[in-house]
Each structure stands twice: as C-alpha cells, then as structure tokens.
Image (cartoon, grey):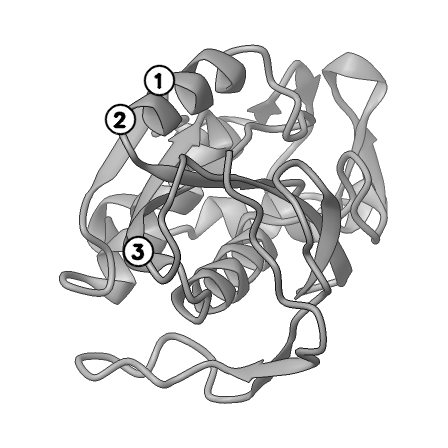
Amino acid sequence: MTALSMAGTNTITAETSASQNILPNETVPVPKVTSNGDLFFINGSHGRLAAKLSLPELREGEKCPMVILSHGFGGDMTFHLFEPIIERLNQNGIGVLRYDFNGCGQSEGEFVNMTVPNEIEDLINVVAYVRQLPVTENISLLGHSQGGVVTSMVSGECGYPQIECEVLLSAASVLRDDALRGMTHGGHFDPWHLDKDSYEVSGGHSIGRPYIQTAMTLPIYETA
C-alpha cells in the first residue's frame, strides 16, 4: 500500500461548511503520519483521539473516497467487524480512518465523562481532519450501535455534499427511550431523581449523570 507522508507539515486549516456552520473553523494539528496503520492523534472534545489510517494503493497525487468508522458504546477502533470492512473498502479503492471516542481505547479522557453530545463533537473534529487530508476525494460515515447514533446525527447536521453517504450498523436508535425508561446498557436508575454522580452499567463501565441527562433529550430522529 502507498504510504501517506506528511513529514514537515505541522498544521492544516479546517474550513467552515459552505452549507451549515457545523465543522470547526480553526487550525487542526496534523501529526506526521508516515505509513498506513500508524497510530496518531486528533484533537477531540476531551483531549486527543487515537486514530489510524488505512489507504488503498494510490498513485502520486491521487485522491480516493474516505470512510470514517465510529465504534459503539464501550468499544474502540479494534471492533472485530471493522477489519473485514476496512479490507474490502481498501480493495475497492476506498480509504478508511478509524478512531477511539473520548475515554475509550487509546484516546484521552475518562469514560465516565463520555456523553453522546461530546462524541458528536469528537466525530465533527475527525471529519474536519479528514477533509483536509491531501488524499481525500469525499467523506462517508459508518457507525456501529451508539456510534451509529453519532454518525446519523453528524451526517444529518452536516448534510450533503459534506457527507457523501452514511452506513449504520445496529444503530442504538432507542437510546433516548431507554434513558427515559431508566435503563441504559444494563444499568437501572430513576431518570427523574438522579442523585448520584455516576451509575454502573454492563461491561464494568460507569456512566456519569450528564450521559443520562443528555440522552433523555437527545434529538436523534429530528437530526438524523
């Protein structure tokens, strides 16, 4: 595979959307990514987000469509379904960027501080980063579970042509309904009397009060 080299480049500028002011209009730090598969970091909502690029074979100066993969609740970019997806996309001339949400995997932040709104901010920053890569022709989004909710809402906010298309894998579309019922990811609580800072859920994780509060009013269908 062709290496993506940005040696000597320190920053890129994220342009503001022509249709909606959703992507950040600011300078985005660019790491020196010298080959496919290198771990690097992108600024997110709660610190740096771990990320990896997988590119198809490209000629000098050639561009390709790019797909951003967003994992689900409590997961990370090593999600087992991502590898065959990346392989197939690369075989068809499509590049892929995968990353860990804040508080997950190798990204900075604490999981207990994660919310869907700050994961949306993470993805918006990742989209802004990918837009400025010299190999990017267009951008599509793919998300699993809670990452599917984030993907659908960012896609809905950005719109076409900023986002070429979206693919949702078992998107957690009942996330808001579950929070209102007082049950999220195996955890139970009274949504109208949240008297603790955090609540235990499945997988050994804890979610903070803000996760539940924001989930209860999350405009999933209105935005997606």
Q: CA distance from mark 2 to mark 1?
A: 6 Å
Q: Nearer the viewer, mark 1 or mark 3?
A: 3
* Residue type highlighted by circle 1: Arg
Which residue bears the numbered disc 1? Answer: 88
Instruction: Kindly identify which residue carries mark 2.
Output: 92
- 186 or 109, nearer to the observer: 109
In this image, 21 relative to 129: left or right? Answer: left
Residue at x 72% of width, y 64% of height: 32
Dividing the picture into quadrants, the one containing residue 159 is bottom left
Q: Residue at x 35, y 56 (%)?
A: 154
Q: Are marks 2 and 1 in contact (CB under 8 Å)?
A: yes
Position of 197 with respect to 57 (left or right) is right
Which is nearer the eye, 63 or 116? 63
Mark 2: few/some/many CA within 10 Å (<14, 14-19, 20+): few
Question: Which of pointers 1 and 3 lies earlier in the amino acid sequence?
Answer: 3
Q: Residue at x 45, y 12 (%)?
A: 84
The residue that appears at 34% across and 22% down in the rendered structure is 91
Vertical placement of residue 95 versus 61, above or below:
above
Q: Tell me which corner region of the image, top left, top right, bottom left or bottom right, holds residue 52.
A: top right
Q: Which kind of residue does numbered mark 3 sit on? A: Lys
Q: Which residue is mark 3?
A: 63
> For residue 182, which numbered disc appears in the image?
none
